[in-house]
Image (spheres, helix red, strand yellow):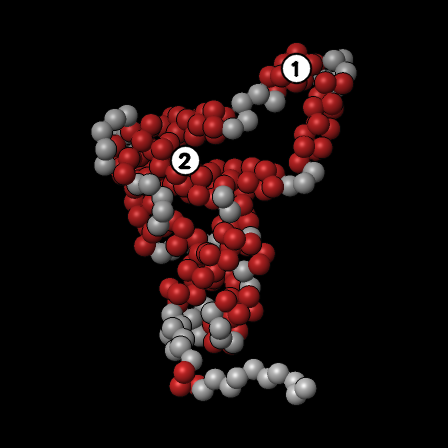
């Protein structure tokens, strides 16, 4: 019996591939990240997804860092900025915006870690920064403090998402927490009097929405009360 062979398909009968675009590449990268994780988002993986060669992608994106920044920009477009223009207490509205940003990154902790060293600069980021500045202005925060507060608030949200999102997916996260609880419980009172006085229940309480909301409130209160240092006398950092 003669071996079966696959029928030859003429190039004219094949469906035409969609033209490559930067937007299409970034959208494909976000899809792969959401399905398989950030580690799987490589130029080779994207090339396979888009039925092209890796070299073709570098026409639109110089490197992985630029790709991550573009993916972040795509996700930032999902941040709920409606509290900026609604009625109500300005601090509550600001925390709602920050929560929306945090929740998006909690779903993608790998990208959140990347964001810690990435400088986003697209329209979605600018809209987020503008919204935060508008709410700080509504609260009477001095402009010079507001300029620094944007980075401070977003950094806290980003680092929290990177930490908590990663821990939520870590195989040994529960073992680590159990070890910490044991260490706190068995800490000698004569050596660690403050830890012993508070106790494990208090020290480990509030992990989740309450603690994050409280953290945002602490930062906002500090921003309201703490002037920026004199630039001429500020210590070197």
> Which residue is pictured at 28% across the width and 25% down the height?
89
| Residue drawn at x 66%, y 11% as measured from the top left | 197
Q: Is residue 18 above or below residue 6?
A: above
Q: Are marks 2 and 1 in contact (CB under 8 Å)?
A: no
Q: Residue at x 66, y 18 (%)?
A: 200
Estimate how packed mark 1 is, as few (under 14), some (14 to 19) or many (20 or more) residues with alpha carbons within 10 Å. some
| Of callouts 2 and 1, the N-terminal one | 2
Give the Cα separation between the discs numbered 2 and 1.
Answer: 29 Å
Whether residue 142 is visible, yes or no, is no
Residue at the spot of label 1: 199
**Helix or strand or loop: what does disc 2 sit on?**
helix
Q: Secondary structure at mark 1?
A: helix
Where is residue 181? Give x, y as percent: 69, 23
Q: Nearer the viewer, mark 2 or mark 1?
A: 2
Tell me where residue 88 sits by quadrant.
top left
Left or right of 203? Residue 142 is left
Q: Quadrant of residue 152?
A: top left
Residue position for label 2? 99
């Amino acid at each position: 019996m003669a071996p079966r062979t696959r029928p030859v398909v003429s190039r004219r009968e094949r469906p035409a591939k969609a033209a490559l675009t930067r937007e299409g590449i970034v959208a494909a990268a976000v899809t792969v990240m959401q399905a398989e994780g950030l580690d799987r988002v490589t130029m080779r993986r994207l090339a396979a997804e888009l039925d092209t060669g890796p070299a073709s992608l570098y026409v639109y994106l110089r490197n992985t860092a630029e790709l991550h920044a573009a993916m972040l920009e795509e996700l930032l477009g999902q941040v709920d900025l409606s509290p900026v223009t609604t009625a109500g207490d300005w601090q509550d509205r600001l925390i709602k915006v920050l929560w929306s940003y945090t929740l998006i990154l909690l779903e993608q902790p790998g990208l959140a870690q990347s964001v810690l060293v990435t400088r986003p600069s697209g329209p979605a980021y600018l809209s987020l920064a503008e919204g935060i500045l508008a709410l700080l202005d509504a609260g009477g925060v001095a402009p010079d403090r507001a300029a620094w507060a944007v980075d401070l608030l977003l950094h806290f949200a980003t680092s929290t998402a990177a930490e908590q999102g990663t821990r939520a997916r870590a195989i040994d996260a529960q073992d680590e927490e159990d070890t910490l609880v044991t260490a706190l419980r068995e800490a000698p009172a004569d050596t660690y009097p403050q830890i012993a006085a508070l106790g494990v229940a208090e020290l480990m309480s509030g992990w989740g929405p309450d603690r994050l909301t409280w953290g945002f409130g602490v930062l906002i209160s500090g921003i309201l009360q703490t002037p920026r240092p004199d630039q001429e006398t500020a210590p070197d950092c």
